[in-house]
Image (cartoon, helix red, strand yellow):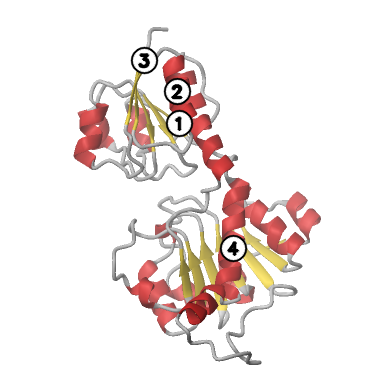
Amino acid sequence: MPAARLLVTARLSDPGAVARLRDAGHDVVARDDDRPAAPDELRRLAAGRDGLLCVPADRIDAAFLDACPSVRWVANHAVGTDNIDLAAAGVRGVLVTNTPGVLDEAVADHCVGLVLAAGRRIAEGDRLVRAGGWTGFSTDLLLGLDLAGATAGLVGVGGVGRAVAARLVGGFGMRGRYLARRRHPGLEDRLGIRSASLHELLEEADVVTVHVPLTPETRGMIGAAELARMRPGAVLVNVSRGPVLDQDAVVEALRAGRIRAGLDVFADEPLPAGHPLTALPNVVLTPHIASAGRETRRLMANLAVDNLLAMAAGRTPPTPVTAS
């Protein structure tokens, strides 16, 4: 196969991943910037390129593909592919891949961190101490959620959801409920959790964690009506995609003090300065870093490179994605 013309749209955490593309003899343009490219810059850089290694902030839609007709391969540095119009890619014969599996444990770790930070009010305690507002030990200062014996509700039990279930149920001694398209008897037997409808899960759970891809069916799946079903003081954690939640409804539930939350993803990213969420004490906010373990990001970069190298060589990539 002749050398391919490739574009890496943002700086990768592992410089060796880009070196692998060049060592394979390909012509590689790699942006030395960890911030995503603006749409006009992305189109300019992608012109004449055969393949892209892109990040979730890059919008690869029909308009982009029409403007850059040379692009035949798209390797997404993420599990989710909501930034890519898979149907448009399929019609145009563009192959798309993602990076599943390698980030499950890291995202689960971060999810549990958000559960603890929000449920045990760790971030609030940190702010109190830093501001000099702590006046000494008090028996009712920042009372939070005891995880042992409480109920965890998992919305989705793919790789990340299963890893979270193992930590919360197997590690912290929580009871477990899960929502999935089908039952998972092996998971039920191993951890003692059981299937539930979304409404049952929300009504029973002290902690609700979200692990579904963003699709037309999941967009806004937890809105005002669903939040109203949650138990008073329950903790909602989202490490999937922001638009799975109705963010305005989440703000209102937090303002009313009905729930606590830990959010790593948002409807619009980056979260605008002065957004209502930033003024609320009962939510912990992190900047889309759930997969940001050093080794995990290295594995993600290199799996994306594996996919791009395979497509450039005319082979089936390790982790292809197609429109469902």
x and y percent of residue 282 in the render? 48, 78
The residues bearing labels 3 and 4 have C-alpha atoms spaced at a distance of: 42 Å
x and y percent of residue 245 in the render? 43, 64
List the residue tagged with mark 1: 15
The residues bearing labels 2 and 4 have C-alpha atoms spaced at a distance of: 34 Å
**Lower position in the chain sequence, tag 3 or tag 2:** 3
The residues bearing labels 4 and 1 have C-alpha atoms spaced at a distance of: 29 Å
Query: What secondary structure is found at the residue carrying circle 2?
Result: helix
Q: Which mark is residue 19?
A: 2
Q: Amino acid at mark 2?
A: Ala
Q: Amino acid at mark 3?
A: Ala
**Lower position in the chain sequence, tag 2 or tag 4:** 2
Q: Which mark is residue 4?
A: 3
Q: Residues within 10 Å of mark 1 (few under 14, many from 20)?
A: few
x and y percent of residue 16 in the render? 49, 27
The residues bearing labels 3 and 2 have C-alpha atoms spaced at a distance of: 14 Å
Label 2 close to label 1 by CB (< 8 Å): yes
Residue at left offset 74%, top offset 73%: 148
Residue at left offset 43%, top offset 50%: 215
Q: Residues within 10 Å of mark 3 (few under 14, many from 20)?
A: many
| Quadrant of the rendering where the N terminus is positioned | top left
User: Mark 3 against mark 4, which lies toward the viewer?
Assistant: 4
Q: Residues within 10 Å of mark 2 (few under 14, many from 20)?
A: some
Residue at left offset 41%, top offset 12%: 25
